Image: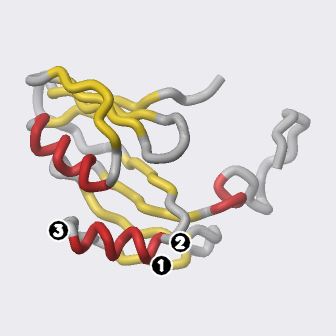
Amino acid sequence: MDLNQVTIDVADLARAAAFYERLGLKRIVWSPPRYARYECPSGASTISLHIADGPVASGVSLYFEVDDVDLEVERLLALGIGFDALPKDQEWRWREAWTCDPDGHRVCVFHAGLDRRFPPWRVAADDGAKR
């Protein structure tokens, strides 16, 4: 099993689309006024934007991994995306920066490398996972 896509509710499709396109996601489906779908620039994951039927609850946190957090944050700042937290090394060995999309969903630009799936404290299991 693999995670294919995440769909988030948004209040304004065009406004949300503009934000995720500035992040660098590639539009693969455009079905206004209610739906759009994007591919990440690398990997196979997708994210969908769907117009909410009611008020948008902003309880979602999205993590986008990049090779160089500082360089990516500089690029996004130049495009007008502000950050609540600039790049910082965390105690769990990830480098993270945080912003929010126009609907309040938290967005983390981070780098973890192998520690994303294989931190030193990973639960031991004979699950066939390869490093």
Q: Mark 1 highlights which residue?
A: 88
Q: How is the image coloured?
A: secondary structure
Which badge, 2 or 3, is on the more N-terminal residue? Answer: 3
Q: Relative to 26, does residue 85 appear above or below in the rendering? A: below
Q: Which mark is residue 70?
A: none
Question: The N terminus is located in which quarter?
Answer: top right
Say which element carries label 2: strand
Could you tell me which residue is drawn at 13 percent across and 35 percent down? 13
Could you tell me which residue is drawn at 36 percent across and 77 percent down? 86
Position of residue 102 in the picture relative to residue 130 (left or right)? left
Position of residue 111 in the picture relative to residue 124 (left or right)? left
Q: Dot 2: few (<14), some (14–19), or many (≥20) neighbours within 10 Å? A: many
Q: Relative to 38, does residue 34 appear above or below in the rendering? A: above
> In the image, what residue type sits under mark 3?
Gly
> Which is more foreground, mark 2 or mark 3?
3
Q: Mark 3 highlights which residue?
A: 80
Q: Dot 1: few (<14), some (14–19), or many (≥20) neighbours within 10 Å? A: some
Which badge, 2 or 1, is on the more N-terminal residue? Answer: 1
Q: Which mark is residue 95?
A: 2
Pick out the residue farthest to the right: 126
